[in-house]
Amino acid sequence: MTDVDLRPPQPATAKQLWMATAAAAAVAALLLGTIVLPAEYGVDPLGTGAALGLVRPDEPPPLTFEHALVPVQTGPLAQFAAPYKIDVVSFDLDPYQFLEYKYHLAQGAGLVFSWESSAPVMYDFHGAPDGGSSASEVSVDRRTGDGASGGLAAPFAGMHGWYWENPGGTPIAIRLSSAGFYDVAVEYRSDGRRITREPSPATSLFTAPER
Amino acid sequence: MTRISAAIVLAGALLASALPLSAHERFRFVGTVVALDDTKLLTVKTKVSNADFTAEIQITNETTIQRDGQPAPESDLKAGVTVVVDAWGDDYFDLEALTIRIVPPIQQKD
């Protein structure tokens, strides 16, 4: 015969409660760093995301700025330690497909552009802050049209550019020309491909002086 | 001892709830329906990076099906119908359909 202790349990002491809270916080922080950040945000500080297969091995590393393309403001003048870049690209947009094309800009860096398409497309000029999720994207100009021209002073550091969608059953061609203090351009295709381009500095247009 | 057990159970539950997380991405497939089986698995003949690809996409209770902007029944997803599927998943082989649009046939390139 075994004696059974039927007395009610003693309430936890303050020390025990603090220890339990600290243990729970430590477990939560561990899970955040090892699983949640790699899986949901592509941030893998400990390498556990790659080891557990939670991040795509072909996912490009986070973009970092060329320091020379961060503006130094002097009154109304923004100056840079490197020439602006130029970019002229064209895309074929298959029926019902979409693509995104964005430039990486520092806060305050400028961009001017013109684009046109062979038929009306649905488009959305938007920006996504560095390190932010898709939910933090800010849409600036969303409509249907066959071209646009404009300029932007980036309101925050991040990727700024277009989403274009072909709304119909025939292919559409898009041509874009831009200049700005961006460091890279990234093309995001609807099949998951990402293509990074490094636009040329404007000084590449210079020709040797005549003698 | 009861509190230690509870803490272990809580930590286990947190870990278990975190494991299903993965790097989900959105994909768009444009192609023609091959089949829709009894388990609501939709097979679509499409192209990925200009190569032929047969995608298998699970239809769920949250999937919306539309034709001309109006809701359409699953029975409209007959073989040969052209569809635009926005799907969600880890990769091309683990996909759930978010929206399916039934569209007119695509004009082939010359």
Image: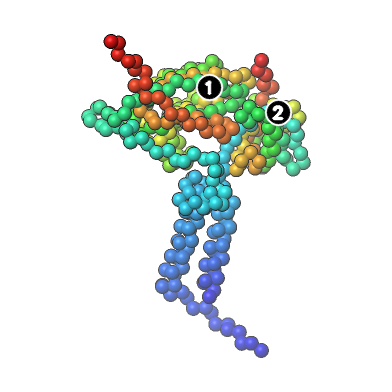
Residue indicated by mark 2? B32
Residue A134 against residue A209 in the figure, above or below: below
Q: Is residue A114 above or below residue A47?
A: above
Q: Residue at x 52, y 72 (%)?
A: B3
Q: Quadrant of residue A14?
A: bottom left
Label 1 residue SS: strand
Q: Amino acid at mark 2?
A: Thr
Spatial CA span between label 2 and label 1 = 24 Å
**Disc 2 secondary structure class:** strand
| Residue nearest the observer in this picture, B63 or A201 | A201
Front residue of this view, candidates A143 and A20:
A20
Q: Nearer the viewer, mark 2 or mark 1?
A: 1
Q: Nearer the viewer, residue A136 or A104?
A: A104
Kindly identify which numbered label has been placed on residue A91: 1
Give the residue furthest to the front.
A211
B63 left or right, relative to A60 = right
